[in-house]
Amino acid sequence: MPRSLRLLLRLSAFLCLVAAPLRAADSAKPPLLDKAGNPAGFKTLALGDAAPDFALPGIDGRTYRLKDFAGPDVLMVLFTSNHCPTSHGIEGRLMKLRNDYRGKSFGLVLINPNHPDGLSADELGYGEFGDSFEEMKPYAQKNGWDFPYLYDGDTQQIARAYGCLATPHVFIFDRERKLRYVGAFDDSRYPQEETVKKHYVRDALADLFAGRPVAVAQTKPFGCSTKWREKREKHQALEASWTTIPVTIEPIDTAGVAALRANPTGKYRLFNIWATWCGPCVEEFPDLVAISRKFDLREFELITLSFDDAKQLSKAQAFLQKQGAGLTKRKQNSVEKEGRKTNHYLYSAASQEELMKVLDPKWPGPIPHTVLVAPGGEIVWRHNGVIDPKEAIAKIVEVMTPYYQPAPPAPAKAAPAKKTE
């Protein structure tokens, strides 16, 4: 989780207080986005229109213009992003397409239309990377991309000119750079090849290279909406509201921890052992809260176990409140469905040894100690001492995957038993 995000969570409450006197005046201003969620200057590129020119920085340090792609007979402009699970879903198929067309007169350029201000922290739960320019290079390297990846997030003028509605959004142009296909990459948001039934881009390219009109020239893009910078104030207000959620903390005994650790739910649970008197615990806690916010929209929850004395429960609660560790409505509803009231507990039993047995037998003893428990109770990651948030996030994304996943097939119905005479 970028440090700037943690600072934003801490400062957002103050920013909203400062902005409060301006709200009445701001209400008289025209909306930043129209009813469709698009900003001023947004255009819809029609079939047959010329490709709008651009001058955008690439992750290789070059500035690219449309004329830099004048050579190929066919040019594909793909708007995509670092954070979007639908974009992640086509990563493998995009590379296969690129490899299949290496020997042909085919150009490919990717553009990130998003700015980090256009996303709230909980929209980043399907990847290690945000949508900043700095994070584009490691994301591309991880995917093995060897084609230009450009950044439009600073002004978002090119996304407006092309009419980028979402990531991914595909625009394919012919030799004269007239638009011949626009829309979705294919009809699946999942990474599994077998989930694709309609290969829109492949079919359009096949038609173009065969000299035929594109049979299906326009489809509706789907994925993550373009993250316009105009969404910034809305996201700041949301993140500020998180810091003021009331925090509840309750005593828990060894049996209660064992029940949580068994994890009969479909959620991944990140357990953290801490105390107000533990300096390293206090140091890492903002990172834990930021991780919790990042994965709030996914099947994930942070569960904290305080080692403070039972008489210090109010002190532990005050610390959690200061950290803005209250549960969002979504998480609170999830907790209540399990018959619980909170994800924050004070371990009231006297024996740390008993806790170690039920939580993590490999726990060496000191705190803070953190374990990630998969559905069903398996520990898939553990760390003793202050966590590295990047390492923790990478592991969570790895085990939860950066993709949407198709629902498992419904179990087959058993055939009715034959009657016997």
Image: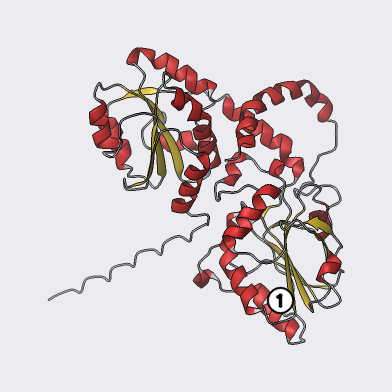
Image quadrant assignment for residue 12: top right
Residue most toward the front? 61
Residue 281 in view? yes
Q: Residue at x 77, y 47 (%)?
A: 35
Image position, residue 47 (x, y; %): 82, 71
Q: Residue 100 versus residue 249: which sits nearer the camera?
A: 100
Q: How many marks?
A: 1
Kind of residue sitting beneath label 1: Val
Q: Residue at x 26, y 22 (%)?
A: 349
Question: Position of 273 compared to 356: left or right?
Answer: right
Would you place residue 289 above or below residue 60 in this image?
A: above
Residue 90 in view? no
Image position, residue 72 (x, y; %): 79, 77
**Image quadrant containing the C terminus:** bottom left
| Residue to which mark 1 is pinned | 216
Residue most toward the top? 311
Would you place residue 417 above or below residue 135 in this image?
A: below
Question: Position of 135 compared to 255: left or right?
Answer: right
Q: Secondary structure at mark 1?
A: loop
Question: Position of 47 compared to 284: left or right?
Answer: right
Number of residues whose C-alpha sits closer than 10 Å to that of mark 1, classed few (under 14), some (14–19) or many (20 or more): some
Q: Residue 11 versus residue 33: which sits nearer the camera?
A: 11
